[in-house]
């Protein structure tokens, strides 16, 4: 996997690519076809052979795996041998997908995280109080989102961690009153405060403080880090400007100290927004937007299904995956932040509106597999 | 929300209102009647208001895709002359008999279990019940967007005495206890929905309560070898597919080509795709999220078939926002929605067998072929169980007074009373 190493040795953005990425995808695809019978069948039925990948324009030919498939099958390569950890998706819609990671893939992930977060200046030596708008980790919770939220509290040494979602009677419950109390208490200390987690709960907590007539000024160096999307609260989703204005008004945090992440357990690349709050594609991945009815690749500026490609993982054939997201890709130069790679805007998730039909036999298509 | 005797209640009042429902419905049944002439005038008034744009504010509150297409048609159907025509066509015709007189009376109390597949359908179902003089209990579908209660409240505003004849609940289907209470107050249950809904209602009902089933149906197009002669009809079919997003019972789900060669189906796809594309260009896809979900599900099914060694190589002809797929498997099934249609070669002599396997589900067919083939195809379709044959463009249009799935629409909502002379 020498080309994979070459890809993950690159700087996170604006790095020259002399064909390492496509070669890395090709070598990894060859590996999966050789060591994964199910994946080999998928490729064979799609009429795909790795030799078809000669340049990055060919990436669209690689069969992608929808998250729906990962929720039904454990698609581990090499019989699951060498898997060091298994991570599950958050299971929106009731089913969770499982992705296995081997040591070398995790090492690539570590290199990527260090480089991207250093680029974003997220590491600090100052002791910090954390509010985690996510799940309090425990043995029963294997979701990647809880692991990454905890991981983010290691960017700066933690004094205290307050979790918004804690397990009560076997179920996670949100206690925003307690969180609001912690925010007020931490705001009076000299240590910076970092928020990490779901934007929905972060926003609800800010609104709750506002309803209570409380505004605070978080200590200098405080940051709001958002990840995991709005999930079941998509109807309450507010636009970014409204979010940033509320953070400024209620917590005294400027928008340059609000950082948003995008990623998925099936595609463990850390997309971190730039100063203009755009998710530029790092050197370690590529994104294709596909037509929502025909799956043909779309040009810049058109909305479609998001396909994510990375040569990171050897233990599971998640080289090209399609989560349930709708998005648009824009040329990097139109952002103006200095990063030249294209940037991805997530528009929403598929199928949020109920399909209303009276066609006979439709329930097989609709009812059974709601994303 | 609940609408009960003209008043709106919160859902939390469900249990207490259900306690009195049977008594209130029976009280109305015993003592009150609907003045049909007045009801027709009220509907006619609403038709006029729809046409003049007075209800635009109501329609704007909903998120019904392509509503503008259907508003004019709804107004047309509610007009006095059309309602009268519909009554004439839908009610049983009474013949003079030598020994016994006959007249028509309402069934009594109808319990409508409405499906959410068409936004105005629940209100329409109640209106049909009212036209026949029935007391109507309605269970709203879970996806109801509020328009049903608004429409029925508007009707009650114009004709307040209807309030005793309309009871609307937003009880979820999973609340079997409440559903049973509503059913027990009724003489007949009118159920709209798929096989699962119909089967569940059949199981739930006591033997003395009748059932009217308006189940889901499937529709298709049959195309002769000379299709190139009919560009207007091909255009009509393409526009129908795109306009309805293939969401209706009457939407085309499969195009059959009169041939036994798959190459002919492929040739048709190449010829027809530009028509479909032109129709899509005229009407860009609105509900991207729903279309994306369907595409992903279908793609995941393909992957599943690969994993299970069941993959069938199918030729796809993709446009932008629309696609045709040649299927060797000729079974009449859902193609998908939002402008993706399956195409199969199916010679006329095999049509009957394929259709019979879908008996009870067949609804609308359109035929694009020379006269002789069209006549032969129509004969086979009717014998196999198809109930509607229309032009390609009008597969999902509603025609004044037409039958509903092969039966007079209001037939099930009335009784014939016989009285010895």
Image: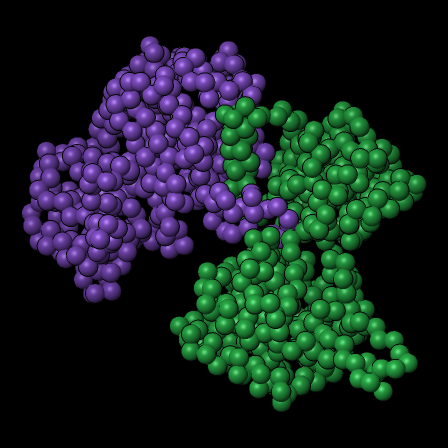
Chain colours: A purple, B green
Q: Quadrant of the N terminus of chain A?
A: top left
Rendered position, B336 above or below A269 = below
Residue drawn where x is 37% and y is 23% of the image: A76
Q: Residue A37's image quarter?
A: top left
Q: Residue at x 80, y 84 (%)?
A: B419
**Residue A164 drawn above or below residue A32:** below
Instruction: Name the residue nearer the viewer: B346 or B338.
Output: B346
Q: Using residue A236 as the reference point, say whether residue B85 is left or right of it.
A: right
Task: Give residue A35's quadrant in the image.
Answer: top left
Q: Position of residue B16 (x, y in %)?
A: 42, 78
Looking at this view, is B130 or A246 the one in front? B130
For residue A56, say whether it is visible.
no
In the rendered image, residue B118, in percent from the top left (x then y), is placed at 61, 58
The answer to whether residue B418 is left or right of residue A213 is right
Q: Is residue B339 left or right of residue B63?
A: right
Quadrant assignment for the C terminus of chain A: top left
The extreme left residue here reads A190
Residue A207 appears in the figure: yes
Q: Is residue A34 above or below residue B374?
A: above
Q: Position of residue B271 (x, y in %)?
A: 76, 31
């Amino acid at each position: 996997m020498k080309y994979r190493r070459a890809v993950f040795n690159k700087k996170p953005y604006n790095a020259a690519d002399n064909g390492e990425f496509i070669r890395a995808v090709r070598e990894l695809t060859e590996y999966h076809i050789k060591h994964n019978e199910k994946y080999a069948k998928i490729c064979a039925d799609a009429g795909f052979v790795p030799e078809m990948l000669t340049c990055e324009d060919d990436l669209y030919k690689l069969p992608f795996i929808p998250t729906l498939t990962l929720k039904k099958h454990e698609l581990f390569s090499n019989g699951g041998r060498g898997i060091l950890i298994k991570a599950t998706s958050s299971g929106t819609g009731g089913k969770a997908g499982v992705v296995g990671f081997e040591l070398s893939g995790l090492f690539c992930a570590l290199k990527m995280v260090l480089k991207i977060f250093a680029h974003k200046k997220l590491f600090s030596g100052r002791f910090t109080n954390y509010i985690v708008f996510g799940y309090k980790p425990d043995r029963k919770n294997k979701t990647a989102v809880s692991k990454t939220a905890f991981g983010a509290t290691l960017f700066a040494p933690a004094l205290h961690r307050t979790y918004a979602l804690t397990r009560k009677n076997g179920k996670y419950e949100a206690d925003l009153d307690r969180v609001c109390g912690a925010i007020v208490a931490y705001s009076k200390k000299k240590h910076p405060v970092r928020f990490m987690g779901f934007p929905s709960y972060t926003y609800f907590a800010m609104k709750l403080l506002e309803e209570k007539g409380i505004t605070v000024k978080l200590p200098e160096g405080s940051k709001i880090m958002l990840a995991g999307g709005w999930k079941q609260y998509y109807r309450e989703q507010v636009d970014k400007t409204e979010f940033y204005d509320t953070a400024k008004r209620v917590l005294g945090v400027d928008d340059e100290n609000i950082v948003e992440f995008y990623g998925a357990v099936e595609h463990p690349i850390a997309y971190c927004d730039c100063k203009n709050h755009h998710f530029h594609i790092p050197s370690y991945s590529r994104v294709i937007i596909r037509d929502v009815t025909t799956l043909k690749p779309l040009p810049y500026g058109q909305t479609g299904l998001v396909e994510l490609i990375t040569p990171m993982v050897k233990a599971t054939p998640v080289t090209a995956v399609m989560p349930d997201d709708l998005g648009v890709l824009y040329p990097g130069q139109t952002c103006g932040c200095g990063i030249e790679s294209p940037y991805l805007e997530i528009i929403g998730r598929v199928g949020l509106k109920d399909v209303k039909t009276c066609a006979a036999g439709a329930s097989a298509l609709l009812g059974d597999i709601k994303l | 929300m609940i609408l009960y005797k003209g008043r709106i209640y919160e859902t939390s009042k469900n249990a207490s209102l259900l306690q009195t429902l049977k008594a209130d419905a029976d009280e109305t049944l015993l003592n009150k009647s609907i003045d049909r002439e007045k009801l027709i005038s009220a509907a006619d008034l609403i038709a006029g208001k729809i046409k003049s744009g007075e209800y635009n504010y109501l329609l704007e509150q909903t998120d019904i895709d392509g509503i503008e297409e259907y508003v004019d048609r709804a107004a047309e159907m509610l007009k006095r002359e059309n309602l009268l025509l519909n009554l004439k066509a839908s009610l049983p015709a009474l013949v003079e008999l030598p020994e016994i007189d006959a007249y028509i009376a309402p069934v009594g109390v109808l319990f409508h279990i409405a499906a959410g597949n068409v936004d105005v359908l629940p209100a329409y179902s109640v209106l049909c019940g009212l036209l026949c003089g029935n007391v109507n209990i309605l269970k709203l579908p879970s996806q109801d967007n509020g328009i049903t209660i608004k429409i029925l409240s508007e009707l009650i505003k114009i004709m307040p005495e209807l309030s005793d004849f309309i009871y609307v609940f937003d009880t979820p289907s999973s609340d079997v206890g409440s559903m049973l209470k509503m059913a027990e107050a009724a003489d007949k249950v009118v159920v709209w929905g798929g096989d699962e809904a119909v089967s569940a209602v059949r199981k739930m009902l006591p033997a003395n309560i009748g059932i009217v089933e308006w189940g889901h149906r499937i529709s298709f197009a049959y195309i002769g070898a000379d299709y190139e002669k009919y560009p207007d009809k091909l255009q009509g079919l393409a526009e129908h597919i795109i306009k309805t997003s293939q969401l209706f019972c009457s939407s085309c789900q499969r195009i059959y080509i009169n041939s036994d060669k798959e190459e002919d189906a492929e040739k048709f796809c190449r010829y027809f795709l530009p028509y479909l594309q032109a129709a899509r260009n005229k009407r860009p896809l609105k509900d991207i999220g729903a279309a994306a979900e369907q595409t992903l599900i279908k793609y995941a099914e393909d992957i599943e078939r690969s994993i299970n060694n069941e993959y069938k190589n199918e030729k796809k002809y993709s446009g932008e926002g629309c696609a045709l797929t040649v299927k060797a498997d000729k079974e009449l099934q859902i193609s998908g929605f939002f402008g993706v249609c399956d195409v199969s070669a199916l010679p006329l002599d095999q049509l009957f067998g394929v259709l019979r396997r879908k008996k009870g589900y067949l609804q609308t067919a359109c035929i694009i072929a020379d006269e002789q083939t069209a006549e032969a195809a129509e004969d086979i379709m009717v014998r196999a169980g198809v109930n509607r044959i229309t032009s390609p463009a009008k597969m999902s249009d509603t025609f004044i007074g037409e039958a509903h799935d092969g039966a007079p629409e209001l037939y099930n909502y009335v009784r014939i009373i016989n009285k010895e002379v």
